[in-house]
Amino acid sequence: MQSQNGFTPLYMASQENHDNVVKFLLSKSANQTLATEPSSRTAPVWRATPFGNHCSKALLSCLDWPADDGEIEVGIPDGFTPLAVAMQQGHDKVVAVLLENDTRGKVRLPALHIAAKKDDCKAAALLLQVFLGQQVFKKDVTFTLRFTMNDHNPDVTSKSGFTPLHIAAHYGNEAIATLLHEKGADINFSAKVNGLLWYLVLKLLKNAEKNLTVSDPTTTVLFQHITLFDALFQHNITPLHVACKWGKINMVSLLIDKGANIDSKTRDGLTPLHCAARSGHDQVVDMLLENKAPIRSKTKMHANDRDIGSTRVQNGLAPLHMAAQGDHVDAARILLYHRAPVDEVTVDYLTALHVAAHCGHVRVAKLLLDRKADPNSRALNGFTPLHIACKKNRIKVVELLLKYGASIEATTESGLTPLHVASFMGCMNIVIYLLQHNANPDVPTVRGETPLHLAARANQTDIIRILLRNGAQVDAKAREEKTPLYVASCLDNVSCHCYNTLLCEEQTPLHVASRLGNVDIVMLLLQHGADTDATTKDLYTPLHIAAKEGQEEVASVLLDNGASLTATTKKGFTPLHLAAKYGNLKVAKLLLQKEAPVDAQGKNGVTPLHVASHYDHQNVALLLLDKGASPHATAKNGHTPLHIAARKNQMDIATTLLEYGAKANAESKAGFTPLHLSSQEGHTDMASLLIEHQADPNHQSKNGLTPLHLCGQEDKVNVAGILVKNGANIDATTKAGYTPLHVAAHFGQLNMVRFLLQHGASVDSSTNVGYTPLHQAAQQGHTLIITLLLENKAKPDALTNNGQTALSIAQKLGYITVVETLKVVTEMTITTTTTTTLEEKYRVVAPESMQETFMSDSEDEGGKLNNNNNNNNNNNNNDNDDDDDDDDDDDDEDDDDEDDDDDEDDDDDEDDDDDEDDDDDEDDDDEDDDEEEDYDDYDDDDDDDDDDDDDEEEDYDDDDDDDEEEDYDDDEDDDDDDDDDDDDDDDNDDDEEEDYDDDEDDDDDDDDEEEEEDDEEDDDDDDEILKK
């Protein structure tokens, strides 16, 4: 019921501060949101506020604000909110009520924390004068604990034990942090999650029906355990840890200036430097190190949860391990610049290179190796980085390690070589790569087991085939004289895989006989009506199998009995594709004699000639060309066989193709020629061959890249010399205006920059957005290149389209050495040399690159069994996208067209205002539910464990943080942690501000410790070893 001006009885009672009337009206369902008139929107909650009326609290408690959009700021005529009016009138209790109800989610934060989050200094100054209490809620029971605090205590803690200064540090709110410090906030306050402790104690007392004011034996015993509870719930996270974790550079500077302890450690031994390195905040890392942060400080690992009294053991992760884990190259580079030991080890003797190998971080691994990291360093169980890369199927890391001298025959404590590990884990590409680099397939372990034994044990049929083709001894005997076939046939959990080929994958006896080349059985089966074109699950016919295995006699019998020459597998491969792929010349001849289509295309447009070129089967390629195969055939991405041969440096194949008329300047869909591909890979002989056959060294792709640009990107100086000698334009520009010198400067290729300058490259050419090579080098922090460019008269005062000099770019990105180098030669007045905050983002400007995607010519093996390839599945979170065959190095080609990424971010590149994602979640949808901040990233316990860690000494899961404590997956648990400290029934997601459980280890490692005693005894234990 409203008056003419919209006044309701509830409105009038609120205005006059008649709280009993307000409560009565609300109990009768009075509508507290009705406004006086449309323009004023003056709700009762506002009317109660100017008078400091406590009945406003009654109104707010009855408001049914939705969890996701419960704003309490109701508009009023003069534009003030209720909170503003309350603050203006000095009604401190009303301010507290309004702030505490301005929360989204089930758990409310203390008012001062909300003020800290909003950087509201005026509200905070007012709140610091009131007596604060803390409420702990449990379902329908409310307990109120009053902690003895003076009227100006800024260290009030939330339920999770965090102070307003922690919140200010997370959001980078420097003004409120300064105010809190001036009011006496403890700059080194360590969060201890004490709210939960008191709730647990109160719950126990309530359940015991004890009077809290009376002492008796029961309450005495309960309070005796407070010390134990407190020990369990101490996280010891300081505001400096929080600011470093979230990369708030200015806040870090402020806290250090105010006396924050740069050496403080969390429960798990994490220092602020660990937090910054782990999150990749290189500017923060640099600042901490300049302020003498302990660069060699190491983390800890929790004791077994089942034994509270046991001691904690250091696991020894240094900041460099953390940077390697997160693939944070710049942070790692800064740590190394400040003399972090490159081969620093954990308690398990794991180095940062082990960590990078585990995670597949090629860039960090290369940086470490360039800084002389030992590629053969051994962990406690004897694992080298190469073992770990093989276990995790990191083919690029394997290639890199071998290039830098890693031992291919290194053995673990139990005698495992990298080939043993890759064979057991089913990593086909790595097995092939190791064998191509002369890995010995017959090296025995201390138990006499060869890689073939372990492949049989793990049911890796394709690996067995690869090993046997490369001369592995099929009758090699282990310590107990078990042959690989015997091992396979005796496994309890899986039947002999060879036998299963008869039963699984829908293979018929004819398929199996064709594979084994048993002509008599093939003929017998055909005489009894076997279907010559029966298909497996992957649509292999017996003829496909015979072509693949090189069984010429079987193929002849099948063809005589009407086998189809054009039947295709799932990927569209004909029998001729498979004969070409595996280099089976006699079978290929037979198929062509029977008029198999010579240019049949698979689903990706791959012809048999493409396949033969890829695998360097020159005899097969020559046969196909003699039979009319087109050297101009293009796959789906536009690659001809010559593209493939050029990229893989197959000289004989390329020569043959060119002799048969292949076009040296054939373009892919993205406009790249074979010369582009060979130049990028640094194949000098191939580049020379192509140029001899009229390849154009100035040919531009659709985004304008020439072969010389790609040499600049990859530092292929030898090829660049050939190109320039044959007329390559040294200053060719891409569509975005990048010259080869720009590209080389951007990617830090010092040798290439020197070469280009020696051959007259323009040192001050600018891109479409005004970037010179000097800008590019400054943006990337390449000091040596900057020095070289300046020595060659580069203009330090040149401006980009956005008015940036090389110096200003370096300042924004915090490259101190670059700034110092450019400062002396730049004439412009520099007003500041401090780095910008992370909120002022600088968008990096990068040149075009070749983003060719290569088609996959891999085929599912006809005999691959779904029900027995768990190990393969476990290994598919790797950095290769290989299908499943035993072949495709990760350069195999996807069927997508080439995404060339010509999209230049151009002019908006430097906009500092690009959308801030505000990790501080001020998108109010999910924010306060987690509530302040899922600091689970401090967790050293992220188990990415697909593995059970029962294993013996080999713990291939260096990722099981519990055994080798390396939390390699730390970034994945931000949202998943179960908030160990919130065992109350409140929603964990709503759970107060900071699930700062980040340092918690889930210690599931009991298994490993039990196994390490009997691992020499039981052969079955070995089945577990590599599964770890």
Image (cartoon, grey):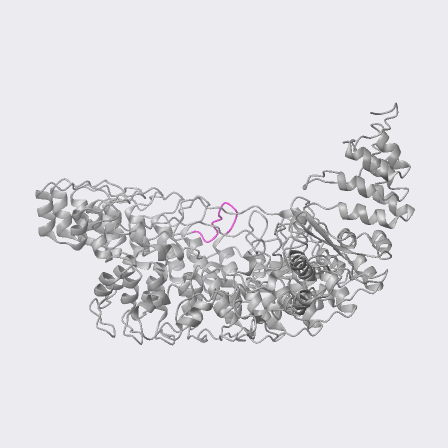
Quadrant of the snapshot with the N terminus: top right
Kindly identify the residue that appears in the image at 47 percent across and 55 percent down.
707
Kindly identify the residue that appears in the image at 80 percent across and 41 percent down.
58
Could you tell me what secondary structure mostly forms the magenta stretch? loop
Q: Nearer the viewer, residue 291 or 487?
A: 487
The percent position of residue 144, horizontal first and vertical second, equals 75, 55
Compared across the picture, whether 889 is left or right of 239 comes to left
User: Where 980 sits versus 448, above or below?
Assistant: above
User: Where 7 sits versus 383, above or below?
Assistant: above
Magenta span has 698? yes
The percent position of residue 391, horizontal first and vertical second, equals 40, 64
Q: Nearer the viewer, residue 46 or 553?
A: 46
Magenta span has 460? no
The percent position of residue 934, horizontal first and vertical second, equals 63, 55
Q: Report the residue that reaches farthest toward the top.
A: 4
Which of the 4 image quadrants contains residue 980? Answer: bottom right
The percent position of residue 10, horizontal first and vertical second, equals 84, 32
Q: Nearer the viewer, residue 716 or 965?
A: 965
- Whether residue 716 is visible here, answered yes or no, is no
User: Where 361 sits versus 839, above or below?
Assistant: below
Highlighted magenta segment, given as a residue range = 696-705
Q: Nearer the viewer, residue 340 or 308?
A: 308
